[in-house]
Image (cartoon, coloured by chain):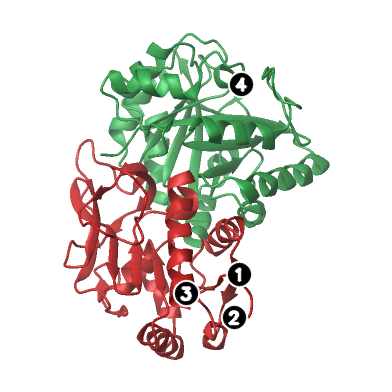
Chain colours: A red, B green
Amino acid sequence: MTATDVTNVAIIDYGAGNVTSVAKALRHLGAEPRVATAPGALAGADGIIVPGVGHFARTTAIDTAMRRVLQHAIDAGTPVLGICLGLHWLYEGSTEAPDAAGLGTFQGRCSALCGSPGIKVPHVGWNAIDITANGSRLLNDLGHQPYAYFCHSYAAPRGDWTVGIASHGDVFSAVVERDVVFGVQFHPEKSGAVGLQVLGNFLRICDEAR
Amino acid sequence: MLARRLIACLDVSHGQVVKGVNFGDLKDAGDPVALARRYNEEGIDELVVLDISATLEGRSAFIDTIAAIARELFIPLTAGGGIRSLADARAVIDAGADKVSVNTAALLDPPIISAIAETYGSQATVVAIDAQMAPEGYEVVSRAGTSPAGRAPLEWAAAAATLGAGEILLTSIDRDGTRQGFDCRLTSEVSAGVPIPVIASGGAGTYEHFADVFTHGQADAALAASVFHFQHHSVPSLKRWLSTRNIPMRLTGERC
């Protein structure tokens, strides 16, 4: 709990990109982001973001202490949002780096998108999201089939917690939501008005959880 | 469904957009941030900013320009022009660019592609290829189109992809600035032959040109500068027109 009205969001920096652009977007929305390189920096955060771009092996930089503190925060009801590689890490793992363990909030493992004629991998660009569940808090007020910016070669399977899907050759989870843990395959910090709406929804969820 | 992308290119020199800008109602038509803001409001899918100043002072102003655009715009931003080293790439990425585009440096020193891809990921690594028709077929040219590189565009694009490039920005020197249409033959030759997205550039003039490059050219994205700057085409009406031709577009207008 913070003393101010400003939503205090910790962004875990494990050396895998997009921390700066996520922080910029949050600041634009009036939140107060801080970059967390050590577990202690998660203390007192209203919400936590696990960002990420790149190879799943990079998530091994999230050490045991950081995992423990993050899991503790989730258990205590602090909202967490995984973005792209950060979403993959919230699953049990990824075939991209089979020896690296994810947090396991979501069941299953991420796997490579299959390229084919007309389907290029990496999947880069604006893709429609099909919202598959009613009442998603993260997707509140997004309307029908919003477009978001994707950039990835691996993707998360559909499961019980999937609330939005996208297809690029394969159908995969674009948005997952389990209690206070959320994940998006796309980059809300690069998805224009739609992305800012998603991040704004996450900030509201954080405020409600304070 | 993955939408095809429309990308606006801003050629920037010493903090000002050059190559003719004619937005009547912009306070400062040469201001890259104002122009970027305008494009974002109109629903452009991506922005490319190129440093064409080629001086140290110009480079420093360019870094400031990237930072200013990235501070308020939340769509993908590629920076290029004069990127010669990993340190140059780091400077534009640190300023807020999402992707860095390399051209001549990659031809002279192909491992720079791998160095950027290993540091920032393939998704951040764009290899720009300038090509022109020669008697024996298409050839790659370097140094802003002045020096034949002795390679074929498809062969170089495929090699770049193997080295870690995540996208190819393919410019037809023959068509650049002509408004005679994209070189669909060049574009399809490269796009069909590499596993990564290809951005077509050079020659945009009419709505049909964009439709042609997405269909016959098999382009994943189309880039233009002056036709957007001069408002020959408004981005929303071009996108609506293309979507009536069954080319998937991210329509903005209403927010989703």
Q: From what the image shows, is residue A156 above or below residue B42?
A: below
Q: Which of marks 3 and 2 is nearer the N terminus?
A: 2
- Residue B215: image x %, image y %? 29, 21
Quick one: label 2, few (<14), some, or many (20+) residues within 10 Å? few
Q: Say if residue A8 shows up in the picture.
A: yes
Give me the residue at 44% from left, 89% from top. Answer: A69
- Residue A14: image x %, image y %? 50, 74
Q: Which chain carries label 2?
A: A
Going by the numbered disc 3, the residue's amino acid type is: Ile
Q: Mark 4 lies on which chain?
A: B
| Residue at image mark 2 | A2
| Residue at image mark 4 | B229
Give me the residue at 28% from left, 78% from top. Answer: A105
**Residue A42 numbered mark, or none:** none
Let me know if marks 3 and 2 both belong to one chain: yes
Task: Residue lying at the far right in this picture: please name it.
Answer: B57
| Residue at image mark 3 | A48
Q: Are marks 3 and 2 in contact (CB under 8 Å)?
A: no
Give me the residue at 59% from left, 69% from top. Answer: A33
Quick one: label 1, few (<14), some, or many (20+) residues within 10 Å? some
Q: Are marks 1 and 4 in contact (CB under 8 Å)?
A: no
Let me know if marks 1 and 2 both belong to one chain: yes
Going by the numbered disc 1, the residue's amino acid type is: Val
In front: mark 4 or mark 3? 3
- Residue B157: image x %, image y %? 40, 37
Give me the C-alpha separation between circle 4 and circle 3: 40 Å
